[in-house]
Amino acid sequence: MNKFKVLISILVLIFSIEVINAQAPPPPTPPPPPPSVRTNDVYSKPKIPSNSTVRARIFYAETGRAVKRTVVMLMAEDGSGGPSSSSSGVTDEQGYVEIKKVKAGTYYAMVNAPGVVSPLAYTNLSRANRGRQQQDIKKAFEGFEKIVVDGISDVDVQIRAIRGGAIGGRVMYDDGDPAIGVKVEVLRKVDEKFVPVISNFSTIISMFSGMGFRTDDRGMYRFSGLPAGDYIIKVTESASHTNSKVTPYRSPEALLFAGNSFLSIFFPNVFDSESAETINVQLGQEFSEANIIIPSRSLYQIEGKLISKKDKSPVKGRIAIKRVNEQNLFSFFSEFARGQGSELTDENGNWKFKELPKGKYKLIVEPIDNQNYFAIKGDAINANRVAKINNANNSVPTPQFSKQVKEITIEDQSLNEIVIEMTYGAKMSGTVYTENSKDMPQRVNVNVVNENGELITREYVSNYAYRDSKSRARRQSETKSHKFQIENIPHGKNTLMVDTTDDGFYLKSATYKGKDLLAQKFELKEGDDLKGVKIILGNDVGTLKGKLLDEDGKPLKNEDFALVPTDAVKRKNPSFYKSVTTNSNGEFETNLAPLEYAVVFFEKANSEKANFDKWLDEATKDAKKVKIESGKTETITINTVSEEN
């Protein structure tokens, strides 16, 4: 899911509000859904009734006083969003609100009053691209009253507005001047990672207006409506680290978040998140002394050249720069404004980054062909000229350079002569097959990961007939296998990883001329072309179901764990891992390849990449085991006390 579009959707909801008010009777239990109606041998889904009126009084839980003139939005329990599925209103001076034409379903009220905690504040936005939205939304609703609507009757409810915690303080420079307009983030600890908190919809509006997350003219800041938990505070000064007048990846997000600056400091006056002090906040509690002093410090530059390793000629490219010591953070500024941390080389391959504090950085180098290079620079004449040349020579394939990742460390001086030599990429092509003449899954991802665990390139193999029964029947013979081709793979040791959107399938094998590509890293040289790679997806899965319990024997809701093969060879390739999340009852069910698995909790892993394999070997050895057989169902109970690693 695109996080920027999600935030835009919420903004649309806020500004499309129907304002009314009043009151009525208690919530009825919704009747069971009517059966599907069969028409001309086609089953049609019955229309959901949507003519209920919800009348509510919103009041502060600790005082009973009305929450006046405040936006209230009903959000569906299933997490569905957007203007078509949510209803909103504004309270009157006595705290009453009336929302009409609400369709049948279960809802929670989001109260947009400053300082009031809402389900939105509990959402883990760092997982927005991991297919975890539904679980996170359900977990966020815990502790809030349900509003049950049948779509026919009116509903009368009382909604308590609960004050969240608050953190505030002052940011100053070491000469005593207030730090005005610097960005401030309050990050909550979730699953061993610190993620930003959006307490309510007003926070989003402030963020998009460019005024949110910043200190005022006194250097003061304050965050309220915070869920109970542990927090760290991050302050970032605005800075431009590039000299280029052209901003690669220019986007609305990058402009809104004013760049991706590396000039950060954490409470209490430390430069890395690992040394930051954790602030524990409870509902209704105020922590007002999170003061930060920004010290004077030396800043450096790095510059160099992008050249071809073969003939030393300049190479045009785009270079992104990232810090490597903040893996435990998820930041809006770094995620949404990542394009601002990129530099475009000049036509001689030169590049430069400035105003960098000392530390470890990662350079992600992406070569650009001439047509795209001129297009990014806004040079339409030269872009069109190159396009005509390419069209005239389209029968002659042009070798392409591969993407590179390079780590550098800035100590106490600038680095002015960094030469990055680009090599031509290798290729890999072949076919994905399914066993037993089964149709292909909707999508298969074929990924190449370098020896540092970084995704270098990937190919999506899509079965477009998957959702179309007519097309599926017409193309039945074509959906048993699919061709794939991956280009620009860097030379060196790589890992092939394959995953699918359908858990009725699993990766069974991947071979090239009889060699197992999954058993170990495979090495590619510049210009290599691996043709005829054969990937087989098995479908003789077994099923594992069970429950996850805490140390008191109580179900653990919406918790993550992984099932990792005990076989040492398969354990080297994450393609064989399976992530599992429990439901609201602590239960889970998943399909698996017929193997023996260990139950592993990855949040306990050592963050050092070099030690991860060793940690996983030890964790697997001591963990609870389960053997999955084809076509059979295994049931287990996992007690986290006995699974401590």
Image: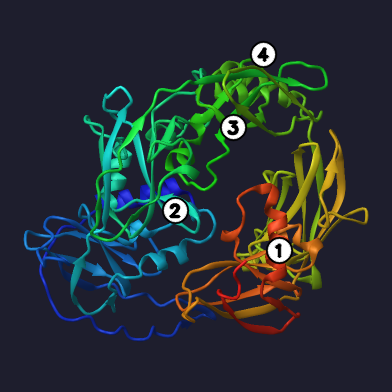
Q: Nearer the viewer, residue 133 or 97?
A: 133
Question: Mark 3 and mark 4 in contact (Cβ < 8 Å)?
Answer: no
Q: Earlier in the sequence, mark 1 or mark 3?
A: 3
Q: Tell me the mark number nearer the camera, choosing from 2 and 4.
A: 2
Packing grade of label 4 (10 A; few <14, some 14-19, many >=20) is: few
Counting residues from the N terminus, which is met first, the one under dot 1 or under dot 4?
4
Q: Counting residues from the N terminus, which is met first, the one under dot 1 or under dot 2?
A: 2
Q: Which mark is residue 361?
A: 3
Residue at position x 81%, y 55% in the image: 431
Residue 515 in the image: x percent, y percent? Answer: 91, 55
> Between marks 1 and 3, how big is the CA–CA gap?
31 Å
> Real-space Cα distance between discs 2 and 3?
25 Å
Figure check: 437 above or below 463:
below
Which amino acid does the dot numbered 3 rest on? Tyr
Mark number, residue 618: 1
Tell us which disc is closer to us: 2 or 3. 3
- Mark 4 highlights which residue? 348
The picture quadrant where one finds residue 163 is bottom left
The CA span between labels 2 and 4 is: 41 Å
**Residue furthest toward the left?**
93
Ranked by sequence position, the earlier of labels 4 and 3 is 4
Q: Are marks 2 and 4 in contact (CB under 8 Å)?
A: no
Q: What type is the residue that disc 4 sits on?
A: Asn
Q: Mark 1, mark 3: which one is toward the viewer?
A: 1
Residue 302: x, y in percent? 59, 20
